[in-house]
Image (cartoon, rainbow, N blue to C red):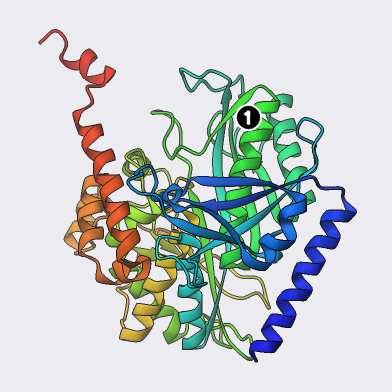
Amino acid sequence: MAAEITERRQHADEAVLDKVAQHGVQLVDLQFSDITGGAKSLTIPAELLPPTLAHGYRFDGAALTGGVREVELDLYLVPDPATLAIFTTDDGGYRRAKLCCSVRRRDGQAFAGDPRSVLERTLEAASATGYDYRVGLEIEFYLFQSDPLELRPPHDAAGYFDIGEDLIAGTRDEIVATLHAMGVAVGGAHHETGPGQEELDLGTTGALRMADQVMTVRQVVRSVAQRRGLRASFMPKPLTDAPGSGMHVFQRLTHRGNGRDALRDDWDELTPTARCAIAGQLAHAPGMCAVVCPSVNSYKRLAAGHRAPRHATWARVSQASLIRLPAAAPGEDAALELRSPDATANPYLALAVALACALDGIRQGEEPPAPLDESLVVYDDEELQRLGIPALPATLGEALAAFAEDEVVRATVGDYIFSQLLSVKRAEWDAYRRYVSPWEHARYGDV
């Protein structure tokens, strides 16, 4: 078995080298993620790619800590051959490619602080339980005028699914074309409801590939926007009076071996597995928040509503629930749409904790509360409180407290990432609480 795996890896490496040579690639970006979700990259000349594929590339692993550089760590970037993407434009005359990397120690074992390895480990746990986890994404963002001091929407009177102004529509078209050329399967793109707000729909694929693609999407969106004189922002709530931007995750579970849908049965009803998975994610929703909604600004999106969840509810017909069951076409696998995440999240950790919490619900055999569909009734906060429905954290501080107490989420990310993430985010929350804002000046300046 080990020999077979080694042979497959050698064939994959050879295919990468052949494609790089065929396209005349001169520079290769080895991309990885820090703990907080920032894209990191180390660039090597293409001549160093063969030994890098074979043995990895040594680097200072302190880059993974999300801003806390206390000690240098000698670690290795190990490229995944399946992630090769060749950029469609040259940078200063140099043709370049990109490979997503996992981080390994010198002995070849996964480094505890590598988010990509966390997702790999969680997917292996799902596989051992008998499930494959695949996801699709809707990722929203704004295109603003190029102003480093202020987020100013461009002239854009377009609404939901409107074509929009030429500058905005043309930028969206270039983003879609660039991603398609790089092998990212964009299922659709359209104008959202906010001024300059866009949405990209990414087709269903394996969770690891999807997390890799999110890193690529954010990079491409920002680069294309900059070339066109715009500023792209994935900030969850950039404008007070406009809708926030989310990253909705459409989760699919299938049985390993036969590939059958594990969420819906032959009578178009939810399976016990699906109900348990929903119960698990609802039970751990507060503990997940610090991972899937990791910024101070994330909670301004959730608090504002507008199709963003504030409570741990599920429904078949609702835009405000944490988990929604989208309609599935005949023959299409069912999906559980998780609506709380935003694009400031580390995609590897976000998908890992979402899957782990669903698996915990399946292990525990939990039953979810009744769905709160809004086709006939709209549930306000008082009614939800009367029904005993738990609210999601209202601030990053509350989310960190829930994160610190959730043993399933902690075990999923591991003690190393848990302590680092808690430290970085507590510092962010403390800095925010000390900051005196222009709103306070306007409100209290003359008191």
Q: Which residue is mark 1?
A: 158
Q: Quadrant of residue 395?
A: top left
Q: What residue is shown at x 56% (from left), y 82% (from top)?
A: 268
Residue drawn 44% across the image and 58% down it: 318
Q: Is residue 357 visible?
A: yes
Residue 385, percent across and down? 19, 57
Q: From this viewpoint, is residue 316 visible?
A: no
Give the residue drawn at x 21%, y 50%. 398
Compared with 210, 71 (above or below) is above
Q: Quadrant of the C terminus?
A: top left
Considering every residue shown, the one lying at the far left of the view is: 447
Residue 17 at x, y percent in the picture = 81, 61
Q: Is residue 359 above or below residue 73?
A: below
Q: Is residue 417 left or right of residue 429?
A: right
Instruction: Spot the residue most to the right.
Output: 22
Q: Quadrant of the N terminus?
A: bottom right
Query: Mark 1: which secondary structure?
Result: loop
Q: Amino acid at mark 1?
A: Ala
- In the drawing, does residue 94 fall left or right of residue 357? right
Tell me residue 290's x, y (percent).
32, 53
Lateral position of residue 210 relative to residue 35, left or right = right
Q: Residue 146 or 385: which is nearer the viewer?
A: 146
Query: What residue is shown at x 46% (from left), y 87% (from top)?
Result: 129
Compared with 146, 252 (above or below) is below
Q: Nearer the viewer, residue 327 or 12?
A: 12
